[in-house]
Amino acid sequence: MKIVFWGTPKYAAENLINIINAGYEVIAVVTQPDRKRGRGKKLTPSPVKQTAIDLGIRVLSTPSIRKDQNTREILIGLKADIYIVVAFGQILPKEILDIPKLGCWNSHASLLPLWRGAAPIQWSILNDDKKTGICIMLMEEGLDTGPVVEQQVTVINDLDNLEILTNKLSDISSNLLVKFLRRLTLLNCLNKSIILEELNPIDQSQLNVNPTYARQIEKEDYLIDWNQKARTIIKKIHGLYPNAYTLHNGKRIKILSANDVFHNEKKFDFNKIDHEYMENNIPGEIIMIDKKNGLKVMSKDYAIQVTYAQLEGKRATDSYTLSIQADLRVKHILGN
């Protein structure tokens, strides 16, 4: 079975490695073009491209597969049996979907039809979902609408941030894809219609769940709004890790780790807090700084304990050290 693998980030590269380690033949990868990354803005290949180069696999890159006739013709000439797509970052047009005889199959990081679209892992955390998972589906022209042939559920733990959950889902996705490919190999199918008959896929319309859409994360999403409830803010910090930030005196402070004082610190002595601030509920106000507990900042309802953060131009550190770096004081207001 000849495979063309489509993907871009580290998450996808890990899936690619697992497929190859399982003994499957990947004849080419398709990925996004090199981009400027890091402080030096050096032109850098995507993790999938770098993995393919390291493994001696042919690389095709395209800024827009919908408009790229040259790449399309190359793909036709490769005569791959199947396309496997993991976080590629572009919507594949019908002309591409129709090329491989065994179809285009996508590993999507949600429990479809929940969180169709570009950022399902982020939105599952931002929405405070209790569980998520991986679905392997046949790709159609619609956005993540195809029938599902494999699914695995995992719990979202309270301390899971984007990095932790992404790594967990990457492992699940890698294993599910190999399981799916083994099923195909045993079937020895000649076309995708037979695959669909044999694998008994689930049509998403039968799942009795209203679809939700995981839109692309925008720059403005990363800014913390201290007028929101503590739980919402903490889920933003987790879901957009490590890039959720606040401002102080015009400088950006990334909040890397935080917890809800009221819910997560049952032994916390609220008598140490000036209750005037609790009652007045001044969002963004620093109500405590100490060496043991770091910063405590008011939200709409409860105090938030910031444990790790990073001041613009500095390394990540504990929040007490951050308070010294940023010259923070009790009664200062974050967010400006």
Image: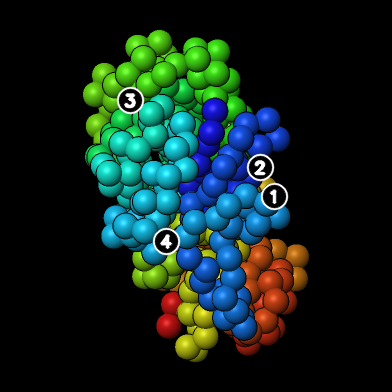
Question: Residue 247, position in %: x, y?
Answer: 48, 79
Disc 1 and disc 2 in contact, CB within 8 angstroms: yes
Give the residue at mark 1. 55
Mark 3–mark 4 Cα distance, whole angstroms, equals 27 Å
Q: Which residue is mark 3?
A: 147
Q: Earlier in the sequence, mark 1 or mark 3?
A: 1
Q: CA distance from mark 1 to mark 2?
A: 9 Å
* Secondary structure type for disc 3: loop
Q: Earlier in the sequence, mark 1 or mark 2?
A: 2
Q: Nearer the viewer, mark 3 or mark 4?
A: 4
Mark 4 falls on what kind of element? loop
Pick whichever of labels 2 and 4 is earlier in the sequence.
2
Neighbor class of circle 2 (other Cα within 10 Å; few <14, some 14-19, many 20+) is some
Q: Callout 2, which amino acid?
A: Ile
Q: In the depicted view, which residue is nearer to us: 3 or 237?
A: 3
Cα separation, mark 1 vs mark 3, equals 32 Å
Q: Amino acid at mark 1?
A: Leu
Residue underneath mark 2: 17
Residue drawn at point x = 53 percent, y = 49 percent: 29
Question: In the image as oriented, which residue stretches furthest toward the front?
Answer: 77
Label 2 residue SS? helix
